[in-house]
Image (cartoon, rainbow, N blue to C red):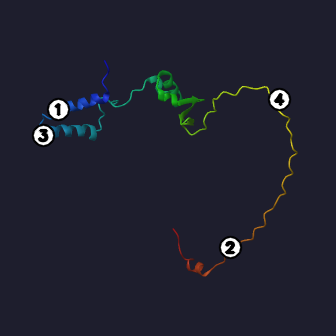
């Protein structure tokens, strides 16, 4: 027998509460609403079940880093989507469009293609040319000296201006 989904159970409970409240008078509903608001809003009381709505994570998974968590999920779950993730040296990569991308923006891992088989072929001799002489150094022309502008009429107009 399958276990009922928590959301479906919560909706069923909500419907049962609504049906029970439908039989109450207006005054009773006002009193209930006032009591609930005082207890949970004004007084700030915590609900009886503080972990309602939270996902329960097994204790052995809580201390794992992201890379270890991905490796554990891949080991224990047979999901096609998890095959898109690879972990190399503690770094998580995801395959998109035939390429691997690091989730933190680091460089992709080295390609895992097999090296081509070595062939015993004699290579032709290498002919080396002598290095070329360095290019002559060209010096930049000297810069003209720039003199700061002297006082002008506008300087006299603004000399008493104060800035905050």
Could you tell me residue 94's position as x and y percent? 53, 34
Residue 18 x/y as whole percent: 19, 34
Q: Which residue is mark 1?
A: 19
The nearer-to-camera label among 2 and 1 is 1
C-alpha span from label 3 to label 1: 17 Å
Nearer the N terminus, badge 3 or badge 4?
A: 3
153 or 97, nearer to the observer: 97
Q: For mark 4, what is the residue?
A: 122
Query: Eyeballing the image, is 157 above or below 111?
Result: below
For residue 145, say whether it is visible.
yes
Label 2 vs 4, first from the N-terminus: 4
Q: Residues within 10 Å of mark 4 (few under 14, many from 20)?
A: few
- Please state which of the two labelled residues, at mark 3 or mark 1, is closer to the viewer: 1
Q: Is residue 146 left or right of residue 164?
A: right
Q: Which residue is mark 3?
A: 27
Check the image and report above or below for 10 versus 41. Answer: above
Instruction: Answer left or right for 9 relative to 132.
Output: left
- Report helix, strand or loop for mark 4: loop
Marks 1 and 4, how far apart in space? 91 Å
Q: For the residue labelled by badge 2, is the local secondary structure a helix, a strand or a loop?
A: loop
Instruction: Tell whether label 1 touches label 2 (CB within 8 Å).
Output: no
Is the residue marked by circle 2 packed among few (<14), some (14-19), or many (20+) residues within 10 Å? few
């Amino acid at each position: 027998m399958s276990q009922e989904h928590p959301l479906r159970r919560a909706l069923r409970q909500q419907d049962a509460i609504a049906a029970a409240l439908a039989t109450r008078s207006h005054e009773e509903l006002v009193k209930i609403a006032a009591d609930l608001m005082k207890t949970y809003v004004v007084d700030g009381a915590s609900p009886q079940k503080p972990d309602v709505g939270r996902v329960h994570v097994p204790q052995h998974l809580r201390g794992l880093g992201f890379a270890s968590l991905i490796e554990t999920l891949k080991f224990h779950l047979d999901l096609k989507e998890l095959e898109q993730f690879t972990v190399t040296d503690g770094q998580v990569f995801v395959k998109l469009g035939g390429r691997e991308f690091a989730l933190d923006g680091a460089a992709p891992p080295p390609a895992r293609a097999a090296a081509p088989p070595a062939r015993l072929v004699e290579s032709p001799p290498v002919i080396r040319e002598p290095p070329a002489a360095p290019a002559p150094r060209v010096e930049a022309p000297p810069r003209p000296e720039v003199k700061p502008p002297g006082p002008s009429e506008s300087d006299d107009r603004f000399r008493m201006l104060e800035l905050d």
